[in-house]
C-alpha cells in the first residue's frame, strides 16, 4: 500500500468518530493491506490526535485469548494506544454518544513504575517495572461495520480501543497470582462473564512482556506511569444506555462502569 493510501485509510477511520457511521471492513476494500500498513495507519491517527493535544497514557493488548486468535486465524496478539480522554472515573456516567458499537470486558491493568524498553525484555524485568495493578473495565469499540473485523482491520483501528475505567484500589503485584486470579462480570446485577488471568496468554505478565518487546522493536518505550491493559479474561459483551457493569477480581477488588441514561446531562 502506498503512503497516500495509508493516509486516506487513517482519515476514513478518524472521520468515523465524527460522523458516527462505521466504515466497511478494510480487508475487503484494500486488497494490498499488510500488517505493516495496518500499524502505520494506526500510528498516523495517533500522531494526528497527539498533534491536536491528546496525550498517550498507555497501551492495550488485544487478541490474547486462544479462542479469538483461532477466530481470526492469527498466532499472536495485537496492540493499540490509550489516550488521555479514554479514561473515565468509576461510577461517573459515561456518555454512549462518543462510541459507535461499544462492548465491554474485564482486565487487570498494570501501572508502570519505570520504563520498559524492548526488545529483549524478560519476565523478571517486566515484573520489576510494575508499580501496582488495578481492576479495570475496557470499553472496546469498532469503526468497522458490524464488528466484521479481521486482524488488519482491528490493528488499523487502534486495536478497537474505546475507553477505560480503572478501579481505585491498587494492589502490589507480589500479593496476587495473576494467572489464577478469577473475575466475575455483571451487567445490571446479572452475571455476564467469568474468567481468570490464565486466559490472557497464560498470564497477564506474558502479555506485558510481549507488548514491551513488540513495541520496542518499533522504537516505542512503555513509559513510567503508563497504564497497560494486557487483555480480557473473558468474552466482551455489548452495553446500552443506563447499564451498570461491575467486574470483581479475586484479591484485587472490583471496578464499576456506569453508562449514562438518555436523559442524563454528562457535559
Image (cartoon, helix red, strand yellow):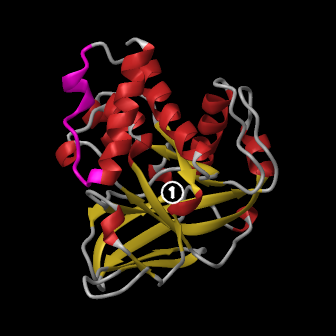
Instruction: Kindly tell me whether residue 57 is visible in this rendering.
Output: yes
Query: Which image quarter holds the C terminus?
Result: bottom left
Judge by depth and name the residue closer to the eye, 267 or 199.
267
**Secondary element at image label 1:** helix
Query: Which x, y percent locates residue 4?
Result: 41, 17
Compared with 106, 91 (above or below) is below
Drawn side of residue 225 relative to residue 103, left or right: right
In the image, the segment drawn in magenta is: 19-31
Question: Split into 4 quadrants, where in the image is the N terminus?
Answer: top left
Query: Mark 1: few, some, or many residues within 10 Å (few <14, many ≥20)?
Result: many
Q: Residue at x 40, y 33 (%)?
A: 10
User: Which residue shows up at 69% across the image and 73% down it?
Assistant: 170
Q: Is residue 30 magenta?
A: yes
Q: Is residue 224 above or below residue 185?
A: above
Residue at label 1? Answer: 197
Residue at the spot 32% in from the left edge and 33% down from the top edge: 153
Toward the front, the furthest residue is 52
| Residue 40 to residue 187: above or below | above
- Predominant SS along the magenta part: loop
Amino acid at each position: 500500500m502506498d503512503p497516500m493510501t495509508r493516509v486516506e485509510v487513517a482519515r476514513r477511520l478518524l472521520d468515523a468518530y465524527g460522523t458516527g457511521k462505521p466504515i466497511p471492513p478494510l480487508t475487503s476494500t484494500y486488497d494490498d493491506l499488510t500488517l505493516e500498513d495496518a500499524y502505520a495507519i494506526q500510528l498516523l491517527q495517533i500522531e494526528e490526535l497527539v498533534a491536536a493535544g491528546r496525550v498517550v497514557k498507555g497501551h492495550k493488548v488485544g487478541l490474547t485469548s486462544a479462542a479469538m486468535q483461532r477466530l481470526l486465524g492469527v498466532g499472536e496478539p495485537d496492540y493499540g494506544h490509550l489516550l488521555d480522554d479514554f479514561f473515565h472515573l468509576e461510577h461517573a456516567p459515561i456518555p454512549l454518544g462518543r462510541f459507535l458499537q461499544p462492548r465491554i470486558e474485564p482486565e487487570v491493568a498494570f501501572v508502570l513504575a519505570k520504563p520498559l524498553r524492548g526488545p529483549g525484555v524478560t519476565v523478571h524485568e517486566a515484573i520489576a517495572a510494575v508499580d501496582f495493578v488495578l481492576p479495570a473495565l475496557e470499553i472496546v469499540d469498532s469503526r468497522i461495520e458490524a464488528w466484521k473485523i479481521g486482524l488488519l482491520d482491528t490493528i488499523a483501528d487502534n486495536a478497537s480501543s474505546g475507553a477505560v475505567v480503572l478501579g481505585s484500589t491498587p494492589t502490589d503485584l507480589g500479593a496476587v497470582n495473576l494467572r489464577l486470579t478469577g473475575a466475575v462480570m455483571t451487567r445490571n446485577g446479572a452475571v455476564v462473564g467469568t474468567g481468570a488471568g490464565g486466559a490472557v496468554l497464560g498470564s497477564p505478565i506474558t502479555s506485558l512482556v510481549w507488548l514491551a518487546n513488540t513495541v520496542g522493536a518499533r522504537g516505542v518505550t512503555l513509559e513510567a506511569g503508563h497504564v497497560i491493559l494486557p487483555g480480557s479474561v473473558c468474552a466482551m459483551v455489548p452495553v446500552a444506555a443506563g447499564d451498570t457493569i461491575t467486574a470483581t477480581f479475586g484479591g484485587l477488588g472490583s471496578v464499576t462502569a456506569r453508562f449514562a441514561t438518555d436523559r442524563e446531562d454528562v457535559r
